[in-house]
Amino acid sequence: MLAASFTASYSGVVAFIAVVSEGSFAKAGDRLGVGRSAISRSVQRLEQQLGARLFFRTTRKTSLTREGELFYENCRPGVEHIVQAVDGLRELRAGPPRGRLRVSSGISFGRTVVAPLLAGFQTEYPEVAVDLLLDDGTVDFTAEHIDIAFRDGPPEQSQIIVKQLFPMQLVVCGSPEYAKKHGLPRSVQELSEHRCINYRLPSGRIAEWELKVDGKPKRFVPPSKNSFNDPDLVLCAVLDGQGLAQLADHLICQPRRSGQLLTCLAHSAPDNRGHYLCYPSRLHLPARARAFIDYMTFHTRALLESSTTDLYDAAP
């Protein structure tokens, strides 16, 4: 009942405003793309709902009654706001990308890849604001109002659009100082003889190491004295010579190339996973989201391709 009443009232108000603006029922019909009789019926239903006559009608002239004048003054600002909202949304979709995006990323990937690319994106799209949220937990696009997310490995939600940006390598590494004192393992079995540093997931569990033994995947948690819930702290501990860790390629590429890290167990490296860009739907995707997706896809791939090749070239 409420829905039907609102529909009738809304169509009647639109017709009423059009008649006042155009000065006649016929011209109002032309403006709205309907016949004069449809405008007349909408206004009559509105008058019945209000219990008041809104127009004086003659064959030559249509004018407002006193009640019509009062009703027009009260409802005109609301209708104008609706028209402005519709026009604004059309301009937003048709014009240059603008507005605010909420972007989620894993902590290390966000710091080393996403954040450094934001300045270039906003130089190209200065009217787009970005809220970057770093979190290694599961993304809830609806509850957290996330527009776009970056994740290592595809998300579990089946309704999410998933786009692989680049393969991801997991690499076992240690510092030259550690290697000088303890050597580097030549097999997965030798890891038990080394100091290992683990990463604790947001769930509280220790992340499993992923390697291959005799060509078959092996997942396990090596014994360790230290674990951290921030991958950057794991990297710091490795650089400090405290032990070995298995880290994602994007996190180690710079210290690896500068000689601060050595890699090992290349022959036991697991299959590549992937860095993924995710968003809720392709339907009615705002221009700002499309611009961000296209920009980050191109520049992320270029950055990772130039920085993560030959990570094992100095491995023993």
Image: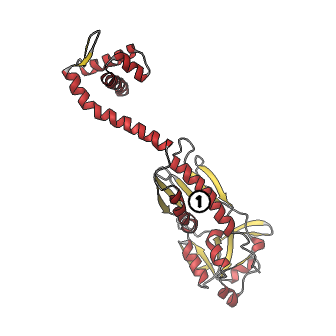
Note whether residue 136 is visible: no
Residue 214, located in which quarter of the rendered image? bottom right
Depth order, front residue of 197/223: 197
Which quarter of the figure is the N terminus placed in? top left
Question: Residue 219 appears at what percent x and percent y?
Answer: 69, 67
* Residue kind at label 1, given as amino acid type: Arg
User: Which residue in the rendered view is the most extreme toward the front?
Assistant: 60
The answer to whether 4 appears left or right of 262 in the picture is: left
Depth order, front residue of 279/125: 125
User: Which residue in the rendered view is the most extreme toward the left?
Assistant: 66
Question: Residue 279 appears at what percent x and percent y?
Answer: 56, 50
Circle 1 crowding by C-alpha within 10 Å: few under 14, some 14–19, many from 20: many
User: Which residue in the rendered view is the most extreme toward the top?
Assistant: 59
Q: Which residue: 22% across, 25% down?
A: 69
The answer to whether 311 appears left or right of 123 in the picture is: right
Picture layout, residue 82 above or below residue 180: above
Picture layout, residue 231 above or below residue 287: below
Q: Which residue: 46% across, 41% down?
A: 91
Note whether residue 115 is visible: yes
Tally the marks: 1
**Tag 1 residue:** 151
